[in-house]
């Protein structure tokens, strides 16, 4: 048997094990044992095969745009909620949680009835009777609102439930609010019309954005997983360990950044990629806290990497007038480069001293020949090229580019295994086609699993945002921020960052950014005259920091749980590794030219200064200095302070001075390290 038959991808296990590749792939579609009861089999198969027509509808709409987008959004959200509920029911039944079972079944019925009613009577509700509703429609709206609230709580817990309830409640109790937060109040009927009946609210622009743009990228992510992209990334990263001491740890950075950029949630990404990167690092000698921290930071960094930027780029382009998606991506290139370099250096400093002598190939189930590696690289490289070509070069619409990317992934996911079967593998074509068909359907199911929580939380956020916009709360927040800061820019942006982190707690990237973009960014723009793009990048970066910031730090919590490490120790390590991420948003405010996306000298100078500052901070905080305690603290403080000044100080001459000091400090440290002279404290 050819050694390429044996891969780390669960859908392609060796024939020499108890499972054949065909059996393993089929088990991914029917992941139950013989002892499982019939309801579980039925519901899991319902989700798996129900995802096929669901994705067919999405692909058909992307290709034809047959319905108005709002009408399509209704059908999309209804289908997503049903498939999510069906996927959650088996565990609820197995746990004998009858309240949960009843609430899920009730939510399924309500979701189906509401989506069907709004879809079939779309023209009247959306056009001819806008602002009016019949009595029974209010009851439908009440039931659907309760269903969304319950599903939101079930997916994201009490913290986000409080956000939704407070947001909706604020619209109702406006006349009784104090000071600038007071408003005229919304009636219960108007609130229900905003949330459901007018096909805004839960079905509004964010839901339509997910349906038209983001969903296909999440399908792409699901297909990448089931076709075995993790295995290829894993192998490439492991091979890099031959050339760099921290190569094993860089696995997390590479895998999590790539996958995290697509799936839109750093917390979910930490669970997805961390399940194999964290054990790999621990087996190589990295401590549990360091391994969890590296995965946490890597998953978070993926949210700001072009071309998808955790799906936040799509929302940013839709919120800023006169800005296209390509503008957002180009603006994000230099900041992303700064972040990648600084995290790479930090991971090297942290992991290299801990990794013992090991053969990287020991972590592979089997070797992959050069021809097989070439086939697999083409398999994933062509869809990525399609994405970059149509999105960045030809500049097709996001929806069309996503459509071509997903379709090309399916095409290559079928073609490459067939070509391998005809050339280098000993597996026949019919057998290969059966396995690939199962992997494709499993990719559809995986896409639903990733998509559903994103769709639910953005639908809920859309409802809250529409309520808040109807009350003019952004103006109230602007006035409050101006009052608290006393008109001082530095105080205002520090407060804005703190609020953005607080509002982003427990939310995926898209939801966190949407909230702060609509509530905080206008304050920076209108009251402190920060450029639009700079203000939005500021709150975007700040919002994703919630996943790393204690005491909630959901991304850290997931990674620490997988690693078996202490939560606070993991959080501490993650902040050390990601420290420039906490400072970079201030660079956007004080040096917005860094986002110009060109090669003009102001952009390059701002980017270069920020890069030097980030490296200085990482070196000072993470490098293991061979000094005594006091001198080490002084050295770390020196690198940190001049790094911050180089990154954000408004005066260019002061930045140049800080850069010169960084160069002197690094040169002095390098000379001392080479002489191996231990100077006394």
Image (spheres, helix red, strand yellow):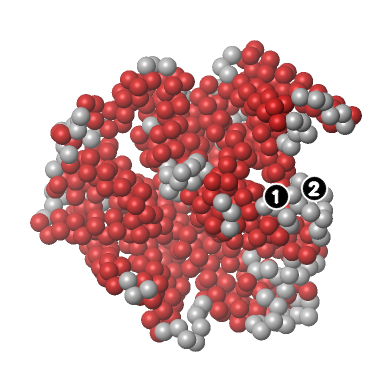
Residue drawn at 82 percent across, 49 percent down: 243
Kindly tell me whether residue 36 is visible in this rendering.
yes
Q: Residue 528's spot in the image, x, y percent? A: 41, 20
In the drawing, does residue 185 fall left or right of residue 490? left
Quadrant location of residue 595?
top right
Q: Mark 2 points at which residue?
A: 244
Kindly tell me whether residue 264 is visible in this rendering.
no
Q: Which residue lies furthest to the bottom in this view?
A: 34
Q: Distance between the residues labelled 2 and 1?
A: 9 Å
Residue drawn at 19 percent across, 50 percent down: 192
Q: Mark 1 points at which residue?
A: 250
> Label 2: few (<14), some or many (≥20) within 10 Å?
few
In the drawing, does residue 577 fall left or right of residue 83? right
Where's the C terminus, which quadrant? top right
Which is nearer the N-term, disc 2 or disc 1? 2
Tell me whether the residue at label 2 lies in contact with that at label 1, contact meaning CB atoms closer than 8 angstroms.
yes
């Amino acid at each position: 048997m050819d050694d390429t038959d044996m891969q780390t991808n669960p859908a392609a296990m060796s024939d020499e094990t108890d499972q054949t590749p065909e059996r393993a792939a089929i088990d991914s579609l029917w992941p139950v044992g013989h002892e499982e009861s019939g309801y579980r089999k039925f519901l899991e198969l319902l989700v798996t095969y129900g995802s096929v027509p669901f994705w067919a509808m999405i692909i058909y709409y992307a290709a034809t745009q047959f319905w108005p987008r709002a009408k399509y959004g209704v059908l999309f959200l209804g289908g997503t909620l049903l498939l999510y509920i069906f996927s959650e029911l088996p565990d609820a039944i197995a746990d004998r949680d009858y309240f949960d079972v009843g609430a899920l079944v009730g939510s399924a019925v309500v979701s189906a009835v509401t989506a069907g009613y709004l879809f079939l009577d779309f023209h009247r509700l959306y056009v001819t009777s806008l602002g009016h509703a019949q009595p029974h429609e209010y009851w439908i709206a009440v039931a659907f609102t309760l269903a969304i609230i319950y599903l939101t709580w079930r997916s994201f817990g009490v913290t986000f439930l409080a956000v939704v309830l407070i947001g909706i409640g604020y619209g109702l109790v406006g006349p009784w609010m104090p000071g600038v937060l007071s408003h005229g109040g919304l009636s219960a009927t108007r609130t229900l019309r905003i949330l459901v009946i007018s096909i805004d609210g839960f079905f509004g622009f964010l839901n339509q954005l997910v349906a038209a743009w983001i969903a296909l990228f999440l399908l792409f992510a699901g297909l990448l997983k089931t076709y075995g992209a993790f295995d290829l990334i894993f192998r490439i990263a492991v091979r890099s360990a031959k050339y760099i001491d921290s190569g094993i740890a860089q696995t997390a950075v590479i895998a999590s950044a790539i996958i995290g950029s697509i799936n839109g949630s750093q917390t979910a990404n930490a669970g997805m990629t961390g399940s194999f990167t964290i054990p790999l690092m621990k087996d190589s000698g990295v401590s549990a806290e360091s391994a969890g921290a590296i995965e946490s930071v890597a998953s978070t960094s993926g949210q700001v990497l072009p071309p998808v930027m955790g799906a936040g780029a799509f929302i940013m382009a839709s919120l800023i007038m006169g800005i296209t998606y390509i503008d957002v991506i180009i603006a994000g290139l230099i900041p992303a480069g700064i972040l990648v370099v600084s995290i790479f250096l930090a991971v090297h400093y942290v992991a290299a001293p801990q990794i013992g002598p090991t053969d990287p190939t020991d972590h592979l189930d089997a070797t992959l020949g050069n021809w097989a590696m070439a086939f697999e690289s083409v398999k994933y490289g062509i869809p990525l090229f399609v994405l970059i070509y149509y999105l960045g070069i030809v500049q097709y619409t996001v929806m069309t580019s996503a459509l071509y990317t997903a379709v090309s992934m399916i095409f290559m996911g079928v073609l490459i295994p067939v070509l391998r079967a005809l050339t280098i593998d000993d597996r026949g074509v019919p057998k290969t086609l059966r396995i690939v068909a199962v992997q494709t359907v499993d990719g559809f199911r995986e896409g639903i699993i990733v998509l559903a929580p994103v769709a639910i939380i953005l639908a809920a956020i859309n409802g809250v945002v529409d309520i808040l916009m109807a009350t003019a709360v952004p103006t109230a927040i602007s006035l409050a921020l101006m009052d608290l800061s006393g008109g001082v820019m530095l105080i205002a942006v520090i407060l804005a960052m703190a609020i953005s982190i607080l509002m982003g707690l427990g939310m995926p990237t898209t939801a966190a950014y949407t909230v702060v973009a609509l509530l905080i960014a206008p304050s920076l723009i209108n009251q402190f005259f920060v450029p639009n793009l700079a203000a939005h990048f500021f709150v975007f970066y700040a919002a994703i920091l919630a996943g790393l910031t204690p005491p909630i730090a959901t991304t850290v919590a997931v990674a620490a749980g997988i690693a078996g490490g202490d939560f606070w120790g993991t959080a501490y390590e993650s902040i050390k590794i990601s420290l420039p991420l906490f400072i970079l948003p201030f660079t956007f405010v004080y040096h917005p030219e860094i986002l110009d996306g060109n090669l003009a000298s102001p952009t390059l100078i701002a980017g270069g200064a920020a890069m030097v500052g980030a490296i200085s901070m990482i070196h000072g905080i993470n490098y293991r200095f061979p000094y005594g305690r006091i001198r080490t603290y002084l050295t770390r403080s020196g690198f940190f302070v001049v790094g911050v000044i180089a990154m954000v100080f408004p005066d260019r001459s002061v930045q140049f001075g800080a850069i010169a000091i960084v160069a002197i400090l690094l040169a002095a440290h390098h000379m001392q390290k080479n002489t191996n002279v231990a100077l006394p404290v």
